[in-house]
């Protein structure tokens, strides 16, 4: 399914059923008194995170969501049936907000997390509730509460442990295809990856982490250029950032300059991003004439205090040490109070 990370939907809860005003009329009870039942509560609209749902795309094509109205009360003290709730299923990691005020209503970060965005109307009371010593034949009844209508904004932020960031065509898609079962589209032109790809990397029988191959970043992305915020919003949740640098790039570009540009763009978008643990990955290191660039980046990594890994996705060189190092950083981040 195509990845879609934002959607707007219209929701309407169910109206509460009206209370009934009726009187008992039987053969030997011609004046049996009030017997009108209560109306049923209207159904609510609930947004629920579902791990089996990976995209907001279906909501683009089906933006209207309505819960069932409550049934009106009936004679013989029969209560109206409650309206069925309507559940809107969204991917885990979806931010729910009011589309008009932009107020964030919920962050559905775990499977099964849910929020009621439109509560069903309360059913009205029948005339049996209004009988008193001074009013033996009440004709009063209550109408059910009206529906609630509102527009809801949905934004999906990936929940991954490791985010692969880098310039377009730096080798991220090839890398994720080697260390996981993910099979992203790979080609020799920029912006091959237009949507994030997720893969699970297993480092043992009970050890694994989720890695996201996120669309390529360009200079000015924090201002919305290129894929801009469409890219950066997906980096916010990751525990570890893996910066992928192409050491075999064309002569007018240098991997050290690429690294500095990437970190600067992350910092302009959010200071929290640059404070996350990070590793530096030198991709395409098996190509000729890459020794000088590798040495420059290794010196930079030492100065930054970031682990540096020289990889060849073609031969598999360096992949295992990288995976085990990433697993260690992810485990440490999860154990920390901030993680």
Image (tube, rainbow, N blue to C red):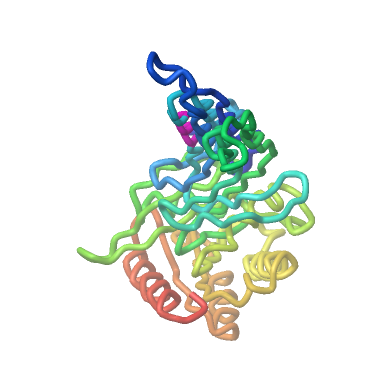
Q: How many marks?
A: 0
Viewer-nearest residue: 190 or 290: 190
Residue occupying the far top of the picture: 27
- Where is residue 130? Give x, y as percent: 58, 39
Question: Main structural element of the magenta stretch: helix, strand or loop?
Answer: loop
Q: Is residue 84 magenta?
A: yes
Residue 190 visible in image: no
Viewer-nearest residue: 65 or 229: 65
- Where is residue 204? Give x, y as percent: 23, 66
> What residue is drawn where x is 52% and y is 64%?
238
Q: Is residue 195 above or below residue 323?
A: above
Range drawn in magenta: 80-86
Residue 211 visible in image: yes
> What residue is drawn where x is 48% and y is 40%?
89
Viewer-nearest residue: 123 or 199: 123
Q: Quadrant of residue 5?
A: top right
- Where is residue 129? Give x, y as percent: 54, 40
> What residue is drawn where x is 61% and y is 77%?
275
Residue occupying the far left of the picture: 205
Q: Quadrant of residue 125?
A: top right
277 vs 175, left or right, is right
Q: Is residue 318 above or below residue 230?
A: below
């Amino acid at each position: 399914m195509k990845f879609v990370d934002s959607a707007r939907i219209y929701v309407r809860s169910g109206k509460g059923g009206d209370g009934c005003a009726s009187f008992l009329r039987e053969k030997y009870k011609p004046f049996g008194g009030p017997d009108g039942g209560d109306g049923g509560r209207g159904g609510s609209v609930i947004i629920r995170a579902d791990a089996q749902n990976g995209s907001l795309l279906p909501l683009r094509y089906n933006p209207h969501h309505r819960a069932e109205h409550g049934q009106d009360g009936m004679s013989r003290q029969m209560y109206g049936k409650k309206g069925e709730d309507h559940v809107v299923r969204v991917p885990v990691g979806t931010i729910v907000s009011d589309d008009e005020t932009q107020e964030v209503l919920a962050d559905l970060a775990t499977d099964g997390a849910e929020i009621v965005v439109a509560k069903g109307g309360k059913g009205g009371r029948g005339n049996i509730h209004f009988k008193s010593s001074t009013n033996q034949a009440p004709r009063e009844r209550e109408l059910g509460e009206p529906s609630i209508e509102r527009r809801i904004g949905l934004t999906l932020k990936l929940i991954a442990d490791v985010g692969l960031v880098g310039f377009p065509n730096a080798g991220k898609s090839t890398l994720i295809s080697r260390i996981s079962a993910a099979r992203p589209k790979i080609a020799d032109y920029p912006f091959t990856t237009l949507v994030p790809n997720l893969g699970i990397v297993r480092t043992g029988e009970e050890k694994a982490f989720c890695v996201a191959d996120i669309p390529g970043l360009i200079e000015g992305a924090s201002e919305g250029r290129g894929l801009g915020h469409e890219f950066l919003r997906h980096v916010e949740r990751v525990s570890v950032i893996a910066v992928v640098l192409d050491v075999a790039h064309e002569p007018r570009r240098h991997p050290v300059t690429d690294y500095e540009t990437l970190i600067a763009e992350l910092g302009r978008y959010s200071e929290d991003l640059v404070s996350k643990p990070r590793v530096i990955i030198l991709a395409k290191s098996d190509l000729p004439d890459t020794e000088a660039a590798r040495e420059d980046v290794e010196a930079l990594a030492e100065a930054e205090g970031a682990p540096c890994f020289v990889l060849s996705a073609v031969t598999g060189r360096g992949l295992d040490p990288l995976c085990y190092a990433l697993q260690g950083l992810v485990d440490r981040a999860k154990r920390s109070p901030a993680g």
